[in-house]
Image (spheres, rainbow, N blue to C red):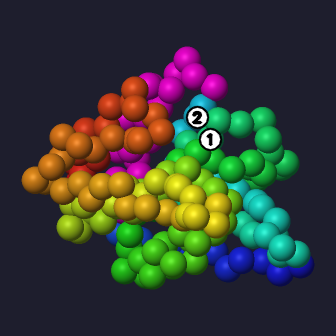
């Protein structure tokens, strides 16, 4: 079995980490009495795709089956994933990672660009052949920042300015 290459994040911008920390801090307390948990970029997910084992570490995730794990890896599919773009990972986040999340049917995928202060919100749907596809639900910037929300967790409040408080 082959392994997916995990991109080395050494030398990542401080702002990259601050956006992740801000997101986790906002969501953590709001999930306190919930079966779901939010995790920063130190949690690994492991899935079998075809005959290959894929390991992936999202920048932030919300997982509602926190007991479906082996060792330090979750085996189940998270409901929400956020990736914060860096020059070294942007292509990977927009292509290979996004494709893997689509194949695994992660319900919601955010791509956050801290340099442009922009959040692209993708939600999973199905095409006419019942194949999972991501559809751009919204692109949130300073001009429509009140629209920032986690589609699959509408009770969670996410402040745009707090997310980008870097």
- Quarter of image, res 84: bottom left
Question: In the rendering, at what x and y percent does residue 77 appear?
Answer: 69, 50
Residue 63 is labelled as 1
Tell me the distance, in whole angstroms, between the alpha carbons under discs 1 and 2: 6 Å
Q: Is residue 77 visible?
A: yes
Q: Earlier in the sequence, mark 1 or mark 2?
A: 2
Instruction: Give left or right: position of 25 versus 65.
Output: left
The residue most toward the left is 143
Q: Is residue 25 visible?
A: no
The residue most toward the front is 128
- Quadrant of image for the N terminus: bottom right
Residue at 41% in and 52% down: 20
Crowding near the residue tagged with mark 2, few <14, some 14–19, many ≥20 C-alpha atoms within 10 Å: many
Nearest the viewer among 131 and 104 is 131
Question: In the rendering, at what x and y percent does residue 65 appear?
Answer: 71, 37
| Magenta stretch encompasses residue 13 | no
| Magenta stretch encompasses residue 32 | yes
Q: Which residues are magenta?
A: 15-35
Crowding near the residue tagged with mark 1, few <14, some 14–19, many ≥20 C-alpha atoms within 10 Å: many
Residue at 43% in and 61% down: 135
Instruction: Give left or right: position of 143 versus 22.
Output: left
Q: Confirm or deny contact between disc 1 and disc 2 (CB under 8 A).
A: yes
Secondary structure beneath disc 2?
A: strand
- Quarter of image, res 27: top left
Q: Is residue 70 above or below residue 9?
A: above
Residue at 41% in and 41% down: 151
Residue at 83% in and 81% down: 2
Instruction: Give left or right: position of 149 versus 32.
Output: left
Question: Mark 2 = which residue?
Answer: 37
Nearest the viewer among 98 and 56 is 98
Question: In the rendering, at what x and y percent does residue 59 appear?
Answer: 50, 58
């Amino acid at each position: 079995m082959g392994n997916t290459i995990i991109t080395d994040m050494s030398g990542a911008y401080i702002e990259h980490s601050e956006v992740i920390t801000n997101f986790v801090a906002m969501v953590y307390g709001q999930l306190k009495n919930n079966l779901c948990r939010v995790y920063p970029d130190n949690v690994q997910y492991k899935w079998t795709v075809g005959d290959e084992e894929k390991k992936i570490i999202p920048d932030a995730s919300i997982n509602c089956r926190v007991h479906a794990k082996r060792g330090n890896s979750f085996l189940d599919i998270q409901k929400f994933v956020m990736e914060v773009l860096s020059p070294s990972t942007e292509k990977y986040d927009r292509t290979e990672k996004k494709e893997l999340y689509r194949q695994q049917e992660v319900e919601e995928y955010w791509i956050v660009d801290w340099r442009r202060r922009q959040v692209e919100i993708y939600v999973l749907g199905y095409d006419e052949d019942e194949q999972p596809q991501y559809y751009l639900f919204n692109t949130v910037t300073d001009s429509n920042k009140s629209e920032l929300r986690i589609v699959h967790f509408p009770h969670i409040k996410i402040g745009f300015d707090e997310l980008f408080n870097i």
